[in-house]
Amino acid sequence: MYDESCLPRIGSNIRLLRGACQFNQQQFAERIGISQTHLSNIEHNNVQVSLKLLVRSANALDCSLETLLDRKAAAEWAQAHDAEADEQASGAKSERVPETAAAETDEQEQYSLEEVRLLLKLLQIQRNIFSYR
């Protein structure tokens, strides 16, 4: 079961993962189809992030939605990504899948069964949050 306490950490997780991929804010914002200012507001938890934007972010970072939600998973992913980048820099070949361009349409995006289940749970959490207001 998911806890709403993860929601305020999403922005800092995005910032951590974006940094691990060596994207500046402008580059990443363009990849996910938003302004740099809006990305900054997301990273500083000044605005709520939509589920669609979470999916775009996960695709642009080539990580799971779970990684965006969980601080420990985000830290582990960033560490592994840094190690992979170091390996590539030293001449080792990587079998990493190319990152998804933000220009792709929703119809082209594919999700694992676990990601679909997570999306449904996030929608339920979001519905519960708005029903309490």
Image (spheres, rainbow, N blue to C red):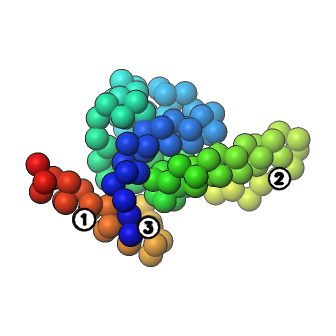
Q: Secondary structure at mark 2?
A: loop
**Type of amino acid at the residue the image marks with label 3:** Glu
From the top left corner, tell me how far across and down residue 70 is, in percent: 50, 54
Question: Mark 3, residues whose alpha carbon is within 10 Å: few (<14), some, or many (≥20)?
Answer: some
Compare residues 105 and 121 and report the one nearer the observer.
121
Q: CA distance from mark 3 to mark 2?
A: 28 Å
Mark closer to the observer (1, 3): 1
Disc 1 marks which residue? Answer: 124
Q: Residue at x 63, y 52 (%)?
A: 77
Kindly identify which numbered label has been placed on residue 115: 3
Compare residues 93 and 57 and report the one nearer the observer.
57
From the top left corner, tell me how far across and down residue 97 is, in percent: 64, 57
Q: Residue at x 65, y 52 (%)?
A: 76
Residue 38 sits in which quadrant? top left
Residue 65 seen in this snapshot: yes
Kindly identify which numbered label has been placed on residue 76: none
**Is residue 102 depicted above or below 111 in this figure?**
above
Question: Mark 1, residues whose alpha carbon is within 10 Å: few (<14), some, or many (≥20)?
Answer: few
Mark closer to the observer (3, 2): 3
**Type of amino acid at the residue the image marks with label 1:** Gln
Q: Earlier in the sequence, mark 3 or mark 2?
A: 2
Q: Residue at x 19, y 59 (%)?
A: 127
Looking at this rendering, what residue extends furthest in the bottom direction?
113
Residue 59 seen in this snapshot: no
Kindly identify which numbered label has been placed on residue 93: 2
| CB within 8 Å, label 2 to label 1 | no
Q: CA distance from mark 2 to mark 1?
A: 41 Å
Q: Secondary structure at mark 3?
A: helix
Quadrant the N terminus occupies: bottom left
Q: Is residue 29 left or right of residue 64?
A: left
Q: Earlier in the sequence, mark 1 or mark 3?
A: 3
**Is residue 128 depicted above or below 13 in this figure?**
below
